[in-house]
Amino acid sequence: MNLNRFPANNFFAAAIIGAVIATALAGCASRASEGAGSASARPPAATAANDAPLTQAQRGILGVWEGTTLASCGVMTIRGRCNAEQIVSITLVQGANSKIGGFYTCAYGNLNCYNMNTTGKVVNAKVNGPQISMIVMMPDGTSCRFNGRNDSGDLIGGYSCSGGGGSFEQGIWRARHSY
């Protein structure tokens, strides 16, 4: 086959492919610079809302909550964890954009912590009057939701843990605001 037979067509095809590639790259570059500009220049209203100070109720739950969990003996708890008691500590701190997050630790009470999850991360904590709620993500991907009523630093409530599409433990949570 004679490759020199259509030299003008090869040049034309290369020019079209080059133009398409240049147009695509220019489009990507302009979108990237638009995204970068929007991240650094937030509207004033959004900036003020995200940097709003914590309410007095929110500030009141910051600090360390030390207490225990006691697993129920129902259908929502793994059979071998009936009456499992753990010593838990939840430290709540102010995070970015005035969100409350923190850290979780679990220690042996009368059974090991579920799946040996001795640490966790508080990813969302909220307060509504005396009610406190938070979600703790564990290293193995499971999570626990803690809810309780704060009565001058003494808290009583419940917890429910889930993972893999279902709940595996729930029970009573008691804690004291230690500092």
Image: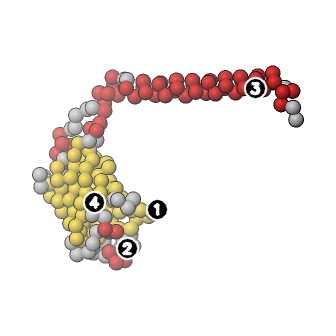
* Residue assigned mark 4: 119
* Residue assigned mark 1: 165
Q: Is residue 66 left or right of residue 172?
A: left
What label does residue 20 carry, if any? none
Q: Is residue 137 left or right of residue 19?
A: left
* Residue assigned mark 3: 13
| Residue pictured at 81% horizontal, 24% vertical | 7
Measuring from the top left, give residue 78's x and y in whole percent: 37, 73
Q: Earlier in the sequence, mark 2 or mark 4?
A: 2
> Label 4 to label 1, Cα distance in Å?
21 Å
Residue type, label 1: Gly
Residue type, label 4: Thr
Discs 4/1, front: 4
| Residue pictured at 88% horizontal, 35% vertical | 1
Q: Earlier in the sequence, mark 3 or mark 2?
A: 3
> Label 4 to label 3, Cα distance in Å?
61 Å
Q: Earlier in the sequence, mark 4 or mark 3?
A: 3
Asked if the residue at tag 4 contacts the one at tag 2, i.e. Cβ–Cβ closer than 8 Å, the answer is no
* Residue assigned mark 2: 78
Measuring from the top left, give residue 54's x and y in whole percent: 22, 37
| Residue pictured at 21% horizontal, 38% vertical | 55
Measuring from the top left, give residue 42's x and y in whole percent: 37, 25
Measuring from the top left, give residue 14's x and y in whole percent: 72, 26
Q: Is residue 36 left or right of residue 68?
A: right
Q: 150 or 112: nearer the eye?
A: 112
Secondary structure under tag 4 reads strand
Discs 4/3, front: 3
> Label 1 to label 3, Cα distance in Å?
54 Å
